[in-house]
Amino acid sequence: MHLRRKENRYTKVFKRGGRNMSYLEELQGRIQKIEKGGKDKYHKSNEEKGKLFVRKRLELLFDAGMNIEDAFFANCMDGDLPSDGVVTGIGKVNNQDVCVMANDSTVKAGSWGKRTVEKILRIQETAMKLELPMIYLVDSAGARITDQIEMFPGRRGAGRIFHNQIKLSGRVPQVCLLFGPSAAGGAYIPAFCDIVIMVDGNASMYLGSPRMAEKVIGEKVSLEEMGGAAMHCSVSGVGDVLVKTEEEAIHYAQNYLSYFPANFRTKPNKVEAKPVPAFEKSITDIVPENQNAPFNMYDLIDRIIDEGSFCEIKKKFAAELITGLARIDGSSVGIIANQPRVKGGVLFTDSADKAAKFIQLCDAFNIPLLFLTDVPGFMIGTKVERQGIIRHGAKMLSAMSEVTVPKISVIVRKAYGAGLYAMSGPAFDPDCCLAFPNAQIAVMGPEAAVNAVEANKIAQLPEEDRAAFIKQKQDEYKENIDVYRLASEMVIDAVIDPNTLRQELVNRFSIYAAKNVSFTERKHGVYPV
Amino acid sequence: MQEVKASMAGNVWKIVVSVGEQVEEGQDIVILESMKMEIPIAAEASGTVKELKVAEGDFVNDEDVLAVIE
């Protein structure tokens, strides 16, 4: 053996496994064994599911590998639990140091023992001290029931992971890439992250497995139906981004992080600005004059942001409201836009929740906000009242109201009722409220208003006179809420040519960047959840 | 078989396909009127319209089946 020949007085000879071994040889041997993770059969079954080995995932995530790895030898006295099933360390993403914890599902299905939990806690505490983003690569069956006393209930038990996450929230970006299951208590790791990226077919989240559901409550359901990635990213909203492969998940996370600073104390990096590509149709061509007709809000977004810079969050969930990160003139901006093509752009309970979290995310990390408003209001009717649309809407208003980053509100077409308020209307201290020339701001639209105010009169009129009367009243109403009247009353700060919106935003955001305000003095608000 | 469902409560304003018609994924099947807005409801997959479950003017609730496509 090569190493044996180099033995000298500095290389003490150990006796291991019935033969002599230098300590360097022993170190190398141990490292090699641990680096391989769990048994071959588990690697093979992961490969069949399209799952990468944890170290491969990390290699793909970092610019140039992991620079620091601690507790590599955790639980090494137990030969079967390399690194105790989790890799923790620090490496660079977009040239920014980030802290990482990554489950190794080849080791006891990535389950948590005492040292697994301690490792996760320590890397979180490192992220806290150094104020670095914290990334969670989750692929874990949950607690090792056999080790529960050591890892579940105590001061350094698994609950502490969530306590740390909550403490980190808003201090540093927290990103979850979900590659496999995240079961029971473990499902709270994604829940406390800013964003959860899920791989379709492999990722899942659930408090009780389908097997447990059948035993305990008698429900027969598949894992995919109950806690699959597609369900969570479109129905429950617990997931944010649905991707097809692990590579895609990693790429999304890298791109997502590029919009953020390392922590709340700094601003996002500015990148080289990209112009808007040439479009055949201008903004005035795509926004219909008829307030009731749908159009595709993505077409408007594409015409104001740097080309290819839209990083959408919760695309498949509550699609009547679009939320995403973008760049305008190279700077990060968070966009909240009504989508008239889906459910008329009406706000529902889920869309309000979606907006509230996104607004908080941007505000926490100094990303300015842009509201693109075309909203008929909050949904009405029995179903939504029973869902508590009032308190859900209040969440959105709260989040939007207490923002201290620059915020610009653009009335694209209509802003009716509490929809105006929720989309950062003038009363909520936007840095400016801009309006397109055919914008309508009102308690309700002309049709609804005339029905509400003139109902008795309409009923008294002969049938043949009604249509003309309604038309006349609607025209009067429209005149009353005319955009120039609102500009004259200084409700809106500027009426702009829609085709100049991008330039207007570049100009205003660059000036508003100097904004330095605090919302109010208190311990914290009482959140309307 | 695919059921085309209402995305929200409202009135059936226009039915824009007829039974037996070939439709493409993303093609509008029914346009609802709700909150004074036109709400197009599109097919999620291509196929033939097998059945229309509603008539113009009907009130429908969220998740009600509007049409069946095969």
Image (cartoon, rainbow, N blue to C red):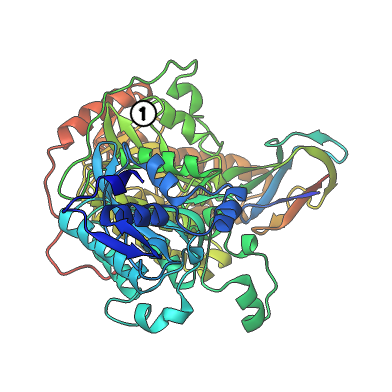
Relative to residue A225, is residue A479 depicted above or below? above
For numbered disc 1, what is the local secondary structure?
A: loop
Q: Position of residue A489 (x, y in %)?
A: 24, 40
User: At x 83% / y 44%, what residue is drawn?
Assistant: B70
Pick the front one: A114 or A195: A114
Q: Residues within 10 Å of mark 1 (few under 14, many from 20)?
A: many
User: At x 25% / y 36%, what residue is drawn?
Assistant: A95
Q: Is residue A356 visible?
A: no
Which residue is labeled 1 in the image?
A: A305
Q: Is residue A339 visible?
A: yes
Q: Position of residue A444 (x, y in %)?
A: 45, 50
The amino acid type found where label 1 is placed reads: Ile
Q: Quadrant of residue A282?
A: top left
Q: Quadrant of residue A490?
A: top left
Q: Chain of mark 1?
A: A
Pick the front one: A84 or B62: A84
A275 horizontally vs A522: left or right: right
Pick the front one: A331 or A54: A54
A172 horizontally vs B44: left or right: left
Relative to residue A527, is residue B41 depicted above or below? above
Quadrant where the image shows the C terminus of chain A: bottom left
A240 horizontally vs A341: left or right: left
Q: Residue furthest right?
A: B20
User: At x 64% / y 61%, what residue is drawn?
Assistant: A225
Q: Quadrant of residue A125?
A: bottom left
